[in-house]
Image (tube, rainbow, N blue to C red):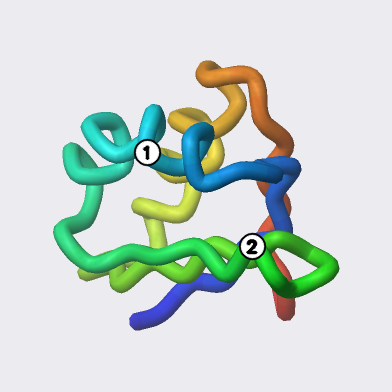
Amino acid sequence: MIAVFKTSVNKKKEAFRLKPKLDSVSDQWNFDLSDCDRILRVKLRHKEEIALIQNVMLSAGFTCNELGE
């Protein structure tokens, strides 16, 4: 499944800083920082991993809300 999140990540530098943490949850993810919602798309194996992504983002100081819940 692909989960889509609205985030507060603004710069590529911030996304790069998140790489090790996001890689620990999924090996397929990307940001679309040109979108007004600064989208994070993540390929997940289980719906339960949505909470892991949100926790990773929050612990790094960013907001992260799933779109289309």
Tell me where residue 2 sits by quadrant.
Answer: bottom left
Q: Quadrant of residue 52?
A: top left
- Give x and y (percent) for residue 47: 39, 65
Image quadrant where one finds the N terminus: bottom left
Give the camera-side residue of 49 and 64: 64
Which mark, residue 64?
Answer: none
Q: Residue at x 54, y 40 (%)?
A: 54
51 above or below 66? above
Seen in the picture, residue 7 relative to 45 is either above or below; the reply is above
Horizontal side, residue 16 vs residue 9: left or right: left
Q: Amino acid at mark 1?
A: Phe
Residue 67 location, quadrant: bottom right
Q: Please report the residue visible at 18 percent of the width from the left and 38 percent of the height from the top.
A: 24
The span from disc 2 to disc 1 (Cα, nearest Å) is 12 Å
User: What's the mark number on residue 33?
Assistant: 2
Q: Is residue 65 above or below residue 8?
A: below
Q: Secondary structure at mark 1?
A: helix
Q: Please tell me which residue lies in front, 51 or 38.
A: 38
Q: At which x and y percent is residue 11? A: 61, 43
Q: Amino acid at mark 2?
A: Leu
Q: Determine whether the residue tagged by mark 2 lies in a helix, strand or loop.
A: loop
Label 1 CA crowd tier, 10 Å (few <14, some 14–19, many 20+)? few
Count of marks placed on residues: 2
| Residue, far right | 36
Q: Nearer the viewer, residue 50 or 28?
A: 28
Instruction: Kindly identify which residue carries mark 1.
Output: 16
Q: Residue at x 30, y 72 (%)?
A: 43
Q: Residue at x 29, y 39 (%)?
A: 19
Pinpoint residue 36: horizontal percent, then vertical percent.
84, 68
